[in-house]
Amino acid sequence: MRAKGLSIPLSFLLPAFLPVLVLSVWPLMQGIYMSFTDYTLGPRETHFIFFDNYRALLNDRHFSNSFRIGAILTFSV
């Protein structure tokens, strides 16, 4: 009886969760995928470069300075 009682509320919640999945989870997964490739907006040919993007980001002087300033502003407010 309890499982039958849950089917109606779940049927009302499902249409609410579909836009959340489509509009937030899908772009998040695409962003993670693209961060491990050499994706550009031109031709659709991409190659996996794994952590090279993150390695370049951590070695960039401007990123480390911006990250430090952002952290200071975040934690000081």
Image (cartoon, rainbow, N blue to C red):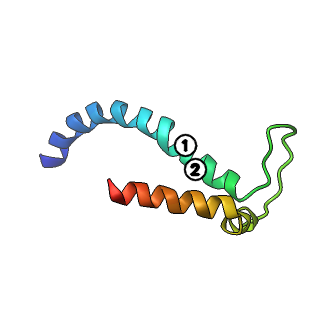
Closer-to-camera residue (21/15): 21
| Residue shown at the point (64%, 59%) measured from the top left | 63
Query: Are the residues tagged 2 and 1 within 8 Å (C-beta)?
Result: yes
49 vs 62, nearest the viewer: 62
The residue located at (78%, 48%) in the rendering is 39
Label placed on residue 54: none
Q: Is residue 18 left or right of residue 49?
A: left
> Residue 65 falls in which quadrant of the image?
bottom right
Q: In the picture provided, is 21 more to the left or to the right than 5?
A: right
Horizontal and vertical percent position of residue 53: 73, 61
Q: Measuring 42% from the left and 37% from the top, which residue is drawn there?
A: 20
Q: Position of residue 1 (x, y in %)?
A: 12, 46
Q: Which residue is the site of mark 2?
A: 29
Residue drawn at x 34%, y 32% as measured from the top left: 16
Helix, strand or loop at label 2? It is helix
| Quadrant housing residue 4 | top left
Q: Are there few (<14), some (14-19), or many (20+) residues within 10 Å of tag 1?
A: few
Q: Is residue 2 above or below residue 65?
A: above
Task: Give amino acid for label 1.
Answer: Trp
Query: Which quarter of the figure has residue 66?
Result: bottom right
Q: Nearer the viewer, residue 15 or 31?
A: 31
Q: Is residue 72 left or right of residue 14?
A: right
Number of residues whose C-alpha sits closer than 10 Å to that of mark 2, classed few (under 14), some (14–19) or many (20 or more): few
Residue picked out by circle 1: 26
